[in-house]
Image: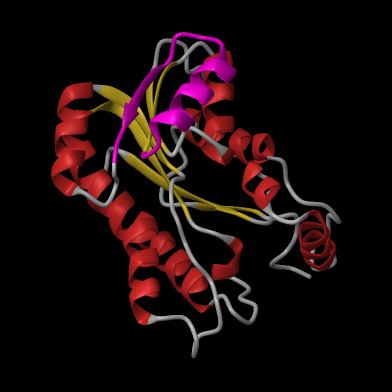
């Protein structure tokens, strides 16, 4: 299978795993559209990709904006939604409003995006949602992340039944070393990675490209549907 000339929409494609998916898809000669809330990040991503990709600014929590977004794009083949902003913290201390905002970003945003996208997805197309390894193995301070991840995986399974023949799958990434951590204090980042890597069978974080390889596989695999791929370095087994 090949993504040559397939149109791929990546909401959250300006950085991290989404950018890595865009880069691999471009190498496979796909026509890529990356979307993000930040116009600045989109321009930087376009420069880094060094190809003629289309870029769109979008607030995934605004359903009317999503409706206009997909009407403007028109027909396409595959939808990837790695975008989200989730804040963590101890359950008794994390404000409920903060938890609701995280759910809006990582669950309701993709929910609305899929609803608006479906009429424009070509025959043989697919959708990939993104959860996280904390849904299978929470640690203290991650109640909201773990809960949302479980909800996203359930959403993917249910949508795979209801939206057939459009395929819907989910990727559950483990610890991934994205540019988000570049903003951290170096000592804090080192301590965080050292502690978390001890919880992995593979004693290192994933690189975004290693998660993106699974995203490419799911777009190409016509017989994979309703599945969650746990790309976590063995986190859920140790």
Looking at the image, residue 88 sits to the left or right of residue 103; the answer is: right
In this view, the residue in front, 156 or 162, is 156
Residue 202 position in % (x across, y down): 83, 54
Q: Residue 66 sits in which quadrant? A: top left
Residue drawn at the location 68% of the way across and 38% of the way down: 210
Q: Is residue 177 left or right of residue 93?
A: right
Q: Nearer the viewer, residue 93 or 49?
A: 93
Percent x, y of residue 209: 66, 34
Residue at 29% from the left image edge and 46% from the top image edge: 60
Q: Looking at the image, what colour scheme do you see?
A: secondary structure
Determine if residue 163 is in view.
Answer: no
Image quadrant of residue 154?
bottom left
Please provide percent x and percent y for residue 191.
Answer: 82, 64
**How many numbered badges does the structure rendering display?**
0
**5 is higher (above) or lower (below) than 127:** above
Q: Which residues are magenta?
A: 37-58
Which residue appears at 75% of the width and 54% of the height?
233
Residue 46 included in the magenta stretch of the image: yes
In depth, the one of 181 and 31 nearer the eye is 181
Q: In this view of the protein, can residue 219 be seen by the observer?
A: yes
Is 142 situated left or right of 112 in this image?
Answer: right
Residue at 59%, 79% in the rendered image: 141
Q: Residue furthest bottom?
A: 92
68 lies above or below 202: above
């Amino acid at each position: 299978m090949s993504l040559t000339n397939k149109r791929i929409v990546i909401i959250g494609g300006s950085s991290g795993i989404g950018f890595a998916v865009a880069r691999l898809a471009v190498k496979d000669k796909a026509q890529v559209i990356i979307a993000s809330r930040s116009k600045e990040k989109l321009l930087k991503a376009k420069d880094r990709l060094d190809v003629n990709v289309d870029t769109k600014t979008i607030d995934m929590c605004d359903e009317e904006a999503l409706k206009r977004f997909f009407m403007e794009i028109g027909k396409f083949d595959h939808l990837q939604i790695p975008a989200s902003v989730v804040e963590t913290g101890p359950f008794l201390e994390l404000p409920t409003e903060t938890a609701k905002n995280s759910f809006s970003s990582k669950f309701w945003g993709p929910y609305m995006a899929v609803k608006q996208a479906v009429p424009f997805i070509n025959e043989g197309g697919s959708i990939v949602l993104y959860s996280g390894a904390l849904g299978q193995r929470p640690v203290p301070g991650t109640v909201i992340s773990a809960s949302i991840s479980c909800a996203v995986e359930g959403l993917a399974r249910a949508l795979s039944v209801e939206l057939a023949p459009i395929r819907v799958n989910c990727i559950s990434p483990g610890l991934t070393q994205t540019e988000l951590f570049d903003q951290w204090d170096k000592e804090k980042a080192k301590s965080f990675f050292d502690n978390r890597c001890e919880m992995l069978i593979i004693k290192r974080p994933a690189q975004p490209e290693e998660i993106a390889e699974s995203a490419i596989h799911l777009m190409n695999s016509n017989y994979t549907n309703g599945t969650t791929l746990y790309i976590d370095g063995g986190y859920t087994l140790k």
